[in-house]
Amino acid sequence: MGRLFNISLAVFAATGSFLFGYDSGVMTDVIQSPHFLQTFNTVPTSPIIGAINSTFSGGAVFGSLMGGFTMDRFGRRMTIFVAAWICLVGAVLQCAAQNLAMILIGRILTGWAVGLMSMSVPIYQSECAHPRVRGLIVGLTQQMIGVGFIISTWVGFGSAHVPATSAFSWRFPLAFQCVPCIILIIGLFFFPESPRYLVQTDREDEALKVLRKLHYDGTNDDWIDEEFREIRLTIQAENTVTEPGWLIMFQVPTYRRRLALATFIQVFTQFTGINVIGYYQTIMYKNLGIEGNRNLLVTGIYNCVGPVANLIFIIFILDRVGRRKPLLFGTIGITLALMCEAIINSQFDKASSPGQEHNLAIAGVFFIFCVSVIFSWSFGPCSWVYMSEIMPYQIRGRGSAFATGIGNWLVSTFWSQVSPIALGAITWKFYFIFCAFNVLITFPSIWFFFPETKQLSLEEIDLLFGDRALGTLPENLDDAKGASESVRQVEDTEA
């Protein structure tokens, strides 16, 4: 089957990422429903709306951290399977909500599920991907997040064309979350476990069969055998020197460095402001004088732009140019676009004529769209690819859980809560917070500390960081020298 099956598996697994995008984007349209606002006695810029979005992100924090346990204990497939069931329950609670508590509990549960998926799907894809196309394979995570945003927007836009007294305008978009959950629950019976997890759990014959199913092209038997040998050797080495638990990530220097890079790439992604735009772009457009169904229409077009740009990037560019260059380009480009957006917003209230307001509104929408395109050519796919590929196997589950839960979702929770208040209180000045962070922290950090990883196998990336899981162990761990010698003996035996 080879590459076709590999891509099919990646696309299917990315249904979990579709849920990420849909669940994140659906509230953008729901909070514009007059019936929803009347039912829950609120307005789009209220702390209640911030709470609805932040409980989703807060649930994702704990879901991501839980994934560090379930991925190592039950595997990659089972983690996604459990997440789909949790999300299904949360979706039912939201669409059937009779009070604010039901909405909040439903959002917590869907957030919990999305947190699990956001860290497990890229790992599953990365561990199944061929090194030459890993950027494309894991980049599908961001692609399907974008598709989820698209579907959520147009489902919301279509549902808005009902009388203001109808609950359909918000109940149906929330109910639609059930569809991808059911697809995942059924489809996971037909796809294999990650070959690296199978080796870790002493199912080596099954792992070799899965590798051949994923990568065999009719002529590359020797490559598959070598890849299998490298996977087995690396996991044996890591098992020899590594103790179980979460503390090991912070005790071994090479693990600590890689965990820091994975976490900060997620933090930097949040500080592009992309999720603030995703959640609250309808407020941003309202500040530019764009209201009603026209506001939702612009939101729908915005959500289409990013996925198109992302698809072009992951197919034709990412695996050729690598990760560092797009991240540096994205930092500069997004900062300039946000600065222009702030300047335009600062002049909107000073416009002297309707024509000038119209021109400023077009310019404001243009630069918001620019942020989406530049993000899709940089942090969008690169953050998931980089995080998933730099983790050594022994901490891949827990490390990705920590990086996603703390770096992505905890920071997202903060912005989800404060952004609607800030957009209402300080309006255009809010954009400069992101600009300052990008210039002072993101750019120099990527420039000095992030190595390139393109087209290397996950085992070769171990060597890029200076070892094959043979990091200098802290003194409080037993027999570090003996452990290293044991690993060398394993390597000599395999050779």
Image (cartoon, rainbow, N blue to C red):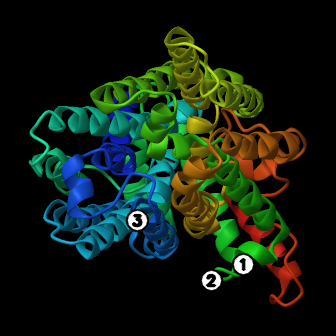
Q: What is the x, y in percent for residue 473?
A: 84, 77
Q: Are marks 1 and 2 in contact (CB under 8 Å)?
A: yes
Query: Dot 3: few (<14), some (14–19), or many (≥20) neighbours within 10 Å?
Result: some
- Residue tagged by mark 3? 48
Secondary element under disc 3, as helix, strand or loop, is helix
Question: Which amino acid does the dot numbered 3 rest on?
Answer: Ile
Residue 99 location, quadrant: bottom left
Residue 317 vertical position relative to residue 346 in the rendered view, above or below: above
Question: Which amino acid does the dot numbered 1 rest on?
Answer: Ile
Residue 371 vertical position relative to residue 484 in the rendered view, above or below: above
Q: What is the x, y in percent for residue 438?
A: 78, 41
Residue 116, disc: none
Residue drawn at point x = 77 percent, y = 37 percent: 452
- Residue tagged by mark 1? 248
Residue 342 vertical position relative to residue 313 in the rendered view, above or below: below
Residue drawn at point x = 60 percent, y = 15 percent: 352
Instruction: Pick whichever, 68 or 171, lies toward us.
Output: 171
Question: Which amino acid does the dot numbered 2 rest on?
Answer: Gly
Using residue 427 as the reference point, say whether residue 126 is left or right of it. Answer: left
On the question of residue 277 being in view, the answer is yes
Q: Give the position of the C terminus as an image quadrant.
A: bottom right
Q: State which tag comes first along the sequence, 3 or 1.
A: 3
Residue 450 location, quadrant: top right
Using residue 365 as the reference point, say whether residue 21 is left or right of it. Answer: left
Closer to viewer: mark 2 or mark 3: 3
